[in-house]
Amino acid sequence: GFYLPLHLASAFGALGVLVATKRMIIGHRVEGEQFWTQSSYCQRWKIHSVISSLSSGWFGNRDLLAFLEGSAFLVWYYRAQGAKIGANVCLYPNGADPMMEEPDLLHIGDDARIDQAVLIAHLNTRGDWMMGPIHIGAGACLRTASRVMMMSTVGARSTLLEGTLVLAGDSSTPSSTWNGWPGEVITPAALAHRRLPVARAAAVCIGRRAHWAVRRRPSLSPCPACSPWRS
């Protein structure tokens, strides 16, 4: 009878240790350069990386944060880590590898959606560790495998399609759609052209379903444009 309460207490205790040790060892991150040979930040960051292994190997050998994906608990955790996150934000409903590395430098607006995207607020080049803020506008959507680098901005209500890279220092305009590696804006005409085959496939699907409802033909093949459908 004590198994579940004990594990829940251990899980929340581990998260509390991660938050407390981050504040004690790393403190609040600030943008700028941190040289490996001159600053103690990189060593303190490595020490905390070892302590962060407390969150791995939990139920089913999964990371502890994996059980919080897409929930308000994950938002609360990263707020405790120093991230500035607005209201009604959804973080990593399908996971991410890695999740936020420098939450102190992240500014996420209201109603933003981040799904399996990578937010990297640092750049490590030949011993020169540089950090910079990342701004995600209100209502922005970051789809699977998109990547946002330091000192960049994703505009309000803009969308990064799958596999899109926003380079360091770059910015997407509000209400725009970006695609590519590196990313570039997609014009409304090009976006409509991309959606046209999907609309045609949906129309074929609806037609086939209507035909099946009227004729009741078991031999009708399923529509490949939607979820698997069997007679």
Image (cartoon, helix red, strand yellow):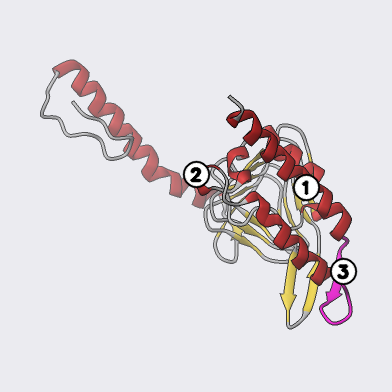
Which of pointers 3 and 2 indicates the residue nearer the eye? 2
Q: Residue at x 21, y 18 (%)?
A: 213
Give left or right: position of 115 versus 231: right
Q: Residue at x 57, y 50 (%)?
A: 57
Tell me how far mark 1 sits from mark 2, CA to CA. 21 Å
Tell me how far mark 3 sits from mark 1, CA to CA. 27 Å
| Residue 120 image-quadrant placement | bottom right
First to last magenta residue range: 28-40
Of helix, strand and loop, which one carries label 3?
Answer: strand
Tell me where residue 197 appears, x and y as whole percent: 37, 45
Which quarter of the rendered picture does the N terminus lie within?
top right
Q: Is residue 30 magenta?
A: yes
Mark 1 neighbour class, 10 Å CA radius: few under 14, some 14 to 19, many 20 or more: some
Q: Which residue is mark 1?
A: 17
Q: Which of the two labelled residues, at mark 1 and mark 2, occupies the earlier sequence position? A: 1
Give left or right: position of 66 versus 28: left
Q: Which residue is mark 2?
A: 60
Q: Residue furthest top?
A: 214
- Which amino acid is tagged 3? Gly
Mark 2 neighbour class, 10 Å CA radius: few under 14, some 14 to 19, many 20 or more: few
Q: Is residue 209 magenta?
A: no
Q: Which residue is mark 3?
A: 32
- Which amino acid is tagged 2? Gly
Q: Is residue 172 above or below residue 80?
A: below
Mark 3 neighbour class, 10 Å CA radius: few under 14, some 14 to 19, many 20 or more: few
Which quarter of the rendered picture does the C terminus lie within?
top left
Residue 83 in sight here: no
Please state which of residues 76 and 3 is positioned toward the viewer in this rendering: 3
Tell me where residue 185 appears, x and y as whole percent: 61, 57
Tell me how far mark 3 sits from mark 2, CA to CA. 39 Å
Q: Residue at x 72, y 62 (%)?
A: 49
